[in-house]
Image (tube, rainbow, N blue to C red):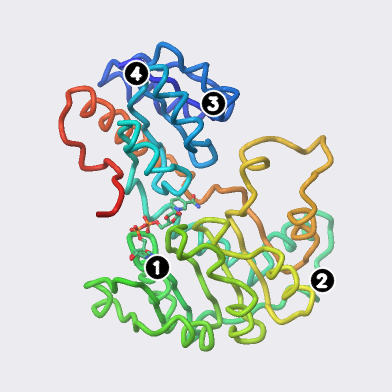
Amino acid sequence: MKVAFFSVHSYDREFFDEANVGFGHELQYFTTHLDTRTAVLAEGAEAVCTFVNDTLDPAVLEQLAQMGIRKVALRCAGFNQVDLRAAESLGIQVVRVPEYSPYAVAEHTIALILALNRKIHVAHSRVRDGNFRLAGLLGFDLHGKTIGVIGTGKIGLEFCRIMRGFSCRVLAYDLYPHPAAADIGIEYTSLDALLEQSDIVSLHCPLTPETHHLIDEEAIGRMKPGCMLVNTSRGALIDTPALIRALKQGTLGSVALDVYEEEGDLFFEDWSAHVIQDDVFARLLTFPNVLITAHQAFFTRDALQNIALTTLSNLAQLGRCETCPNEVKLPD
Ligand code: NAI
């Protein structure tokens, strides 16, 4: 099948070319995002393959359908960027990679917590500068602390397992509690109770209309003073201006982010020689108690191999008109 890839980086090519040896699809790579201006590049392809910040709104889907493209392969787990209603009405099938490595994201979440708590990023620069003072690097023991986990699916559950290994109490909130939770020692509670009792709150639910700005001014107001907030899920789970107000007031202790609600124009590119135009993001970068990575939680060799294999296999199944278990459908 001829597939037009958007938002491609060197590592995507490396892993997709390697995996494609077993499939023989014709892969066409474009570095640009998919949007209404660039959709035309897919002319002649049967499918497009896109990533988290590509646009799949009704206008783009309409353009794809007009070019005869009725297959969209997301090389990611989240599908909040796709207008599924429009896709369905245009007869466009959407497939995704629901699970490629929950470990990659859960382990990156732990890396952020440990680094932020013990100020590893600051310590690293200091030591390289010949400054061996400890003032300003004070952290806290994770042992015995209460961790609040919102969303206990594949990633959240793995994160809970690791936190239990640190002897933390793990509180969780999910619309559908996981059957394995009791064995791991997770206690389900209400969202309010979780926010009020947790020393660290970590977000692992998908972005949906219901979870958009789940962490707003009111939710932040419920959190323990000095609480650490961690988001490796999707940026728009947090109302960023409300977060900035709380950081300025000193009510939140610290914040670790791998995602940002307006990341589409920033992340995955090198802007180091440019002035950042997003004032909200620029403000976030000024806080000493905020640690940000640019949507890299998924970025392990194991995950990229699984993403490539699953995506190409999804496309092969669609090509053979077989039922694909990874097809994303509108809820009934
Ligand atoms: P999953 O589908 O296995 O789990 C999501 C969980 O959230 C489910 O248990 C679901 O019941 C729960 N949930 C849904 N709506 C909720 C609500 N309103 N309140 C509380 N819980 C709710 O998904 P998985 O694989 O664990 O991924 C979670 C999210 O992580 C993805 O949606 C994606 O946004 C993000 N992600 C981030 C990556 C990164 O590189 N930073 C990479 C992969 C995923």
Q: Secondary structure at mark 3?
A: helix
Question: What is the x, y in percent for residue 331?
Answer: 29, 54
Ligand 1, image quadrant it occupies = bottom left
Between label 2 and label 1, give the one nearer the viewer. Answer: 1
Apparent side of residue 30 relative to residue 190 in the rendered image (left or right): right
Residue, disc 3: 10
Q: Is mark 1 within 8 Å of ligand 1?
A: yes
Q: Is mark 4 within 8 Å of ligand 1?
A: no
Residue, disc 2: 133
On screen, residue 45 above or below 181: above
Q: Quadrant of the C terminus?
A: bottom left
At a point 47% along the width and 60% down the height, the residue shown is 209
Q: Amino acid at mark 1?
A: Gly
Between label 4 and label 1, give the one nearer the viewer. Answer: 4
Residue, disc 4: 46
Q: Quadrant of residue 260?
A: bottom right
Question: What is the x, y in percent for residue 330?
Answer: 31, 49
